[in-house]
Amino acid sequence: MGFQEISKLACIHGRFQPFHLGHANYLQECIKLWPNVLVGLAAPTPVKITTPGVEHRTTAIANPLTYTERVILIRAALNDLEMPQTNIEFLPFPIDEPESIKYILPQSVLCVTTKLYEWNEEKIRRLNKAGYNTFVLEKCIKFDFNGSLIRQYIIENNSAWKVMVLPSVAQLLQSWQFRDRLLSLQKESK
């Protein structure tokens, strides 16, 4: 039945700016437990509400990729990982406005997360308050990098970022002149 059985779905979520190996691990760990996964893209539109301690999440340079570009990157990553795409769907996931999630995601869908970062605790609190059950993946790996470092390396023209993402993601970002976009956003923010 697949996606018709809403109560058997799990939803991971993140900004995925860009989708990297840590995100791939998160998705892979979720799929081990739930065969049909919704991938929620946080900040589907610019975020106007800042949260103390994670203010960087709302800046333009922290959100350089559009919703559609992130879907394309994740689909490309799935190909690299040799994961079927038929059991994965995408949806906007406005965690910064948790009261809006119920209009997108049925409350019977389990929200799956990690506890790798302090922000995860806040997300769990917000989701529970909005009426969602949450599940923490204990086996996810915390990598020594995150999206901020990857974007910084790209700005600096440091090729070390390429081993932090899957090959197709690196190829797409380069073909989209992603570094030029980041440099432009950096200039605008000064």
Image (tube, rainbow, N blue to C red):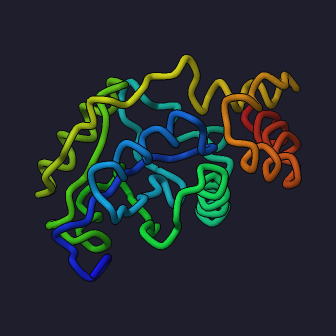
- Residue at the (38%, 57%) spot, across then down: 94
Vertical placement of residue 108 versus 168, above or below? below
Q: Nearer the viewer, residue 96 or 144?
A: 144
Q: Quadrant of residue 125?
A: top left
Q: Against 61, is 116 above or below?
A: above
Compared with 123, 7 (above or below) is below
Q: Residue at x 23, y 60 (%)?
A: 99
Measured as percent of width and height from the top left, residue 132 is found at 15, 56
Residue 59, located in which quarter of the rendered image? top right
The outermost residue toward the top is: 144
Q: Residue at x 68, y 42 (%)?
A: 166
User: In which quadrant is the C terminus drawn?
Assistant: top right
Q: Is residue 61 left or right of residue 118?
A: right
* Extreme residue in the front direction: 82
Task: Give residue 164's position: percent from left, percent from top.
Answer: 67, 30
Quadrant (top left/top right/bottom left/bottom right) for the N terminus: bottom left
Quadrant of the rendered image containing residue 155:
top right
Residue 167 seen by the camera = yes
Please report the residue visible at 20 percent of the width from the left and 57 percent of the height from the top: 110
